Each structure stands twice: as structure tokens, then as C-alpha cells.
Amino acid sequence: MLYRDFETQAELDEQYDVESAVDDFGEYAAFFVEQSERAREDLDCDLDVPYGPTLAEHVDVFPADDPDAPMLLYIHGGYWHSLSSKEFSFVARGPVSAGVTTVVLNYALCPHVTIDEIVRQSRAAVAWLHDEADYGDADRIHVAGHSAGGHLTAMLLATDWEDEYGLPADVIEGACSISGLFDLEPFPYTWLQPKLQLTWGQVRRNSPIRHIPDDAPPLIVTYGDDEPGEMCRQSDDFLEAWREHGLDGTYLPQPGDNHFTAIEGFLDAESPLCEAIFEQMELDQP
């Protein structure tokens, strides 16, 4: 066996190739680009704001009207090797309309950097948002991420903020992982390995299922029920382990959604996805 009950790369690829799991991936990609262009036109925004020293370390900020608004850091997917913040400006639409400053993270991609480095950049963005940014309430930072971004969200929750960054242990008030990836062990056996170039040390260091913290903020775990079985299982297993550690974890069902439509709820402040995040923020509903 390569991983669990899977004997061949083809079997694993079928489970984790989320683009091939839908008939019209190109339409979803075009929709995200179109909606993101509209969001940048319609909403106030500060683009390409640096949070670190490398060219890829920047964020796109969509501020709410209130300078003391809670802040939502959104981390995009793309299997750590593709896409950027610009395809996901649309996620600000619902949160900003409800008074939440939305910060869309950009980060360097594999194989130019390792997943270790992507995790470091994600953590650096949180530190910057707390210590240096002036876009909202630094004591009300929430994080949401999709797919690879869901993985990075979980890695942020496993961070020792006090020892490693000199930040409050509760610098992140709440989190939402959408269609996240929590065990990296299968990926060296998949079509992704030439792009990710994972070592087994990287797999161990960067699998959130191996690093569930003793204390953490509330976590929402969600995915579309029309996603491949392994994608659903990864979230289910992580949520079960999270709860077994005595941590606050909530499952948000998304019936009828696939891997890509699972984030379209960000377009509407009254969607179940936005409402769950706002409830976690203890935000007055729009």
C-alpha cells in the first residue's frame, strides 16, 4: 500500500485531483477571476501591501468602514504551487459588507520555495497584521483558508506564538478551514510531487494532524459534500482529532457543493459560510 488503502498513484490522483473531479473547472476559475476583478473595482482596497522581505510576501486589504473592525485573513488554495491573492479578491465581498476588514494573503509557491517556507510566510503575515498593520482591531484577528489555504490555516493554529513570535498566545481569535488538507503523507505519491518536492521531514513538520495544539481558538471545518472521498475524510479525521484534544470544533455542512463552490459563500454576507464565521466573531448579523 502507498497510503491507507491505496495501492497505486492513479488511485491517489483520482482522489486528490480536484480539478478533474468537476466537469467545468475552467468555468469556476473564470468566475473567480471575474468576481475578483469586480470586487477590486467596487470595494476600497489597498493592493500588494508588503508584510515581509520577499517579493511574494504581500497582501490585498479590503478595509471595512470602521477602523476598529475585526480582521479576516484569507489564505488561498492552489495546492501550494499555483494561484495568487488576485484570483480571490471576491472573498472580501460578503465580509466587508458586514463590517469585517478582509486581508487576502499572497505567498511564494512551490517548487520555488518549500512548504516550510510557505508556512513561515503565513505566520509572518499574522505577526505583521497584529504588530504593524493599521487596518482593524489587532485583537480580533480571524483566519480562513481553502484547500492548501485550509492546511495553512491549521498550521497557524499549531504555532507557538508566544515563544516564536513574542505575540499573545491567542493572537488568532477564530478560524475556518474549508476543504483543508491536514495529512501530507499521500502527496509524495501523487502527480503533485514534482511540483512540491516534499521530503518526509517536511511531511511530518507540516501535517496539522500531527501537531494539534493543547490550546486553540474555535475552529470551523467545512467542505462540499460533492468533493472526492479523501478530501472529505481528511477534514472529518482532523475535526475528530481536534475535538478529542478537547478543542472547540464545529462542522458546517455544505450540501450540493464541490471543492470550488464551497467558497462561493464569501460573496454573500447572508450565506451559511459567512454567517458561521460572523457568529464565531460574535458579530452582529447584517
Image (spheres, rainbow, N blue to C red):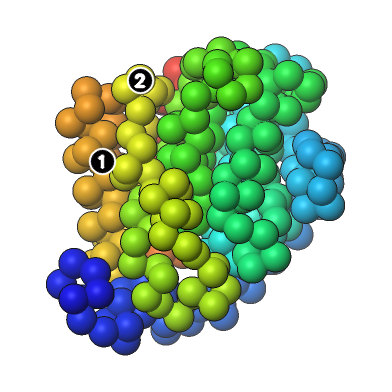
Location of residue 7 by image quarter: bottom left
Please give left or right for residue 177 compared with residue 31 in the image: left
Point out residue 40 in the picture as x, y percentages from the top left corner: 78, 51
**Residue at position x 26%, y 34% from top?**
242
Q: Residue at x 49, y 30 (%)?
A: 159
Q: Residues within 10 Å of mark 2 (few under 14, many from 20)?
A: some
Quadrant location, the N terminus = bottom left
Disc 2 from disc 1: Cα separation: 15 Å
Q: Which amino acid does the dot numbered 2 rest on?
A: Asp
**Alpha-carbon neighbours of circle 1 within 10 Å: few (<14), some, or many (≥20)?**
many
Residue 129: x and y in percent read: 70, 27
| Vertical arrangement, residue 18 with respect to residue 11, above or below | above
Quick check: 29 left or right of 187?
right
Residue 218 at least partly seen: yes
Residue that carries the numbered disc 2 in the rendered image: 215
Label 2 sits on a secondary structure element that is loop
**Label 2 vs 1, first from the N-terminus:** 2
184 in relation to 22, above or below: above
Q: Depth-wise, is mark 2 or mark 1 nearer the camera?
A: 2
Q: Nearer the viewer, residue 98 or 263?
A: 263
Q: Position of residue 281 (x, y in %)?
A: 48, 22
Amino acid identity at mark 1: Leu
Vertical side of 89 occupied by 2: above or below: below
Q: Residue at x 64, y 55 (%)?
A: 88
To which residue does mark 1 refer?
A: 239
Circles 2 and 1, Cβ within 8 Å, touching? The answer is no
Does the rendering let one see residue 21? no
For residue 132, which numbered disc appears in the image?
Answer: none
- Residue closest to the eye, 101 or 160: 160
How many numbered markers are drawn? 2
Where disc 1 sits, the SS reads helix
- At horizontal 49% and vertical 64% (from top left) the residue drawn is 198
